Image (tube, grey):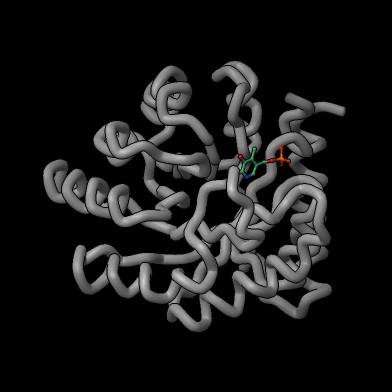
Amino acid sequence: MELQERLNDVRLRIAAGERQADRLAGSVQLVAVSKTFEAEAIRPAIDAGQRVFGENRVQESQGKWPALKAERSDIVLHLIGPLQSNKAADAVALFDVIETVDREKIARALAEEMKRQAKTTRLYVQVNTGLEPQKAGIAPDDTPAFVTFCGEELGLSIEGLMCIPPAEENPGPHFALLAKLAFKCGVEKLSMGMSGDYETAIAFGATSVRVGSAIFGAR
Ligand SMILES: *Cc1c(COP(=O)(O)O)cnc(C)c1O
C-alpha cells in the first residue's frame, strides 16, 4: 500500500470511531508521527493534505522540519518525546505544541524561553498513567497540582494531557484515567492513542491521536 492509501485508511477509521462514539465529525485530530523518516518520506503526507505532525527528538527534527515548514506555513509540529531543559530553547523555536511537560524544571525552562523568544508554544502535560519507572511523565496523583502550579506560578496555560499506556496492558483503563484527570484539571485536550489503539482512545475521548507506523510504515 502507498502512504496516501494508508493515510486515507487511518482518516476513515478515525471518522468511523467518531461516529461510533457519538462524537462530532472532525473532533479528533490526527497527529502523523514521522519520527525516523526523512523529509522525502514525509512530503507525500503533506501533499495528501496532512498538516499536523509529531516528532520525538528535538535534534532529529531540526534536521528536517525547518525546510519542510518553510515550504508550507500551515504545518503544525508536535514534540511527543522527552525534553531536556538544555533543549528547551530549540524546542520552543521549532515546535508549535510540546506534549511532554512533566516536571517543574522543564516547565520553568519553557516559561523562560517562551518569554525570551516572545513565542507561545501550546503545552500538554505528560502523565505516566502506568507509573512505569522507565517512562517519562508525572504521576497521576500529582497531575492536578502540577497543572495548577504551571498556571499560577509560571503563567503557563496547559491545554491538555498526554499518555502512553504500558505496552503490555489493556490501554482502555489508562485512557479512562487520563480523561478523568483532564476533567479534574480543567483541561480540554486529550492526546492518547497510537497505531495499535487509536480507535480505543477515540472511544475514551481522545481529542488527538498520534499515529506513526500505520501511516509511514514500520520503523
Ligand atoms: C512513536 C510514537 C507514537 C507513534 O507510534 P506508532 O505505534 O508508530 O503509531 C506515538 N506516540 C509517541 C509518544 C511515540 O513516541
Residue 92 as seen in the image, left or right of residue 21: left
Relative to the observer, which residue lies in front, 63 or 109? 109
The quadrant of the picture occupied by the C terminus is top right
Q: Can residue 54 be seen in this view?
A: yes
Q: In which quarter of the image is residue 154?
A: bottom left
Residue 113 percent across, percent down from the top left: 19, 44
Which sits in the foreground, 78 or 47?
Answer: 78
Instruction: Please give the name of the residue rendered at 46% of the width and 51% of the height, measured from the top-left corner.
Output: 99
Question: Going 69% across and 38% down the picture, which residue do you hit?
Answer: 212
Q: Position of residue 76 (x, y in %)?
A: 45, 44
Residue 71 appears in the picture as rendered: no
- Residue 86 spot, x, y in % from top left: 28, 32
Give the percent coordinates (x, y) of residue 9.
Answer: 82, 46
Q: Quadrant of ligand 1?
A: top right
Which quadrant holds residue 18? Answer: bottom right
View extreme (right): residue: 1
As drawn, the residue found furthest toward the left would be 116
Report the side of 108 relative to 190 (left or right): left
- Using the image, determine if residue 72 lies above or below residue 124: above
